[in-house]
Image (tube, rainbow, N blue to C red):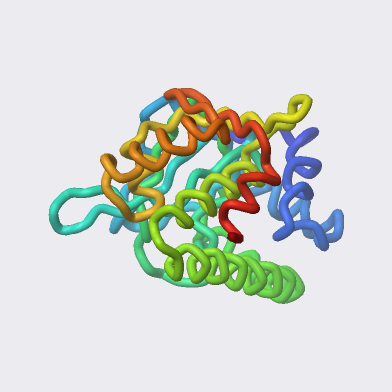
Amino acid sequence: MSRVNKDTTAEFLQQFPIFQDFSPEELKQVEDIAISRSIQKKSVIFSEGSEKEAVFFIRTGIVKAYKTDENGHEQIVSFLKTGDMFPHTGFFNAHPYPATAEAITPTELLAIPVRLFERLMLSTPSIAIKIMRVLGDKIRELQDKLQVLSGQDVRNRVLSFLLMLADQHGQTHEDQVIINLPMTHQEFANSIGTTRETANRLLNQLTKENFLEVDRSRIIIHDLQALKQQRDA
């Protein structure tokens, strides 16, 4: 690990809602404890249940966060991209990491050690207040997403997840939305809490109906509005 280039760190940090209201002096204090990390593809950043040492901010790359049940099956919590932080509540409790985080592409991270940041919040209460407000909003957003997905049948969960991926990872090209995400069908199934066979069947059905194309590196949505109408029907 190495200390971050201070010329670019403040600009990077202010892209995150958690730091948007920070004054230049407050940002400088965060810069002073920031550490950069380069992560290779398929490397584990931290494991579920291990001691929480830092909160991470993605400069470039894609990270998947997943939990493992008693049978060893993955349940994917989220796919994280450039501009995301994880774990979201990392600064506010002493609990171990709630999930395993693995880089699925080469990834550049900014790490902020939890203990050093706790000292910073104790010495500068204005920082603690600003972060509590932002994380409270983020928790409510995640709870809303979870409620939407858990209250639907499998087909609608697939449609909602595709629309979520389009919103978070999609790039519009002419009339199409291209989601460049190297995700296997098993990972897709794990993300919505179903079997790979069921996910394959529903994705194949949507492909035959010409709503989308799927391969291991990307998903192409041909008509986003039509997909929304399918979900809302």
In this rendering, position of residue 54 left or right of residue 184: right
Q: Position of residue 21 (x, y in %)?
A: 82, 62
Q: Residue lying farthest left?
A: 71
Question: Along the line of sight, which residue is nearer the eye, 197 or 165?
Answer: 197
Q: Residue at x 74, y 71 (%)?
A: 130
Q: Residue at x 58, y 40 (%)?
A: 81
* Relative vertical location of residue 102 with respect to residue 140 in this rendering, above or below: above
Q: Residue at x 61, y 46 (%)?
A: 227
The reply to whether residue 33 is in sight is yes
Quadrant of the image containing the C terminus: bottom right
Q: Position of residue 109 (x, y in %)?
A: 56, 37
Q: Residue at x 69, y 68 (%)?
A: 134
Determine which quarter of the picture holds residue 232.
bottom right
Q: Residue lying farthest right?
A: 24
In this rendering, position of residue 93 left or right of residue 170: left
In this rendering, position of residue 7 left or right of residue 3: right
Question: Along the line of sight, which residue is nearer the eye, 169 or 31?
Answer: 169
The reply to whether residue 60 is in sight is no
Question: Along the line of sight, which residue is nearer the eye, 200 or 3?
Answer: 200
Q: Position of residue 146 (x, y in %)?
A: 49, 66
Q: Position of residue 26 (x, y in %)?
A: 78, 59
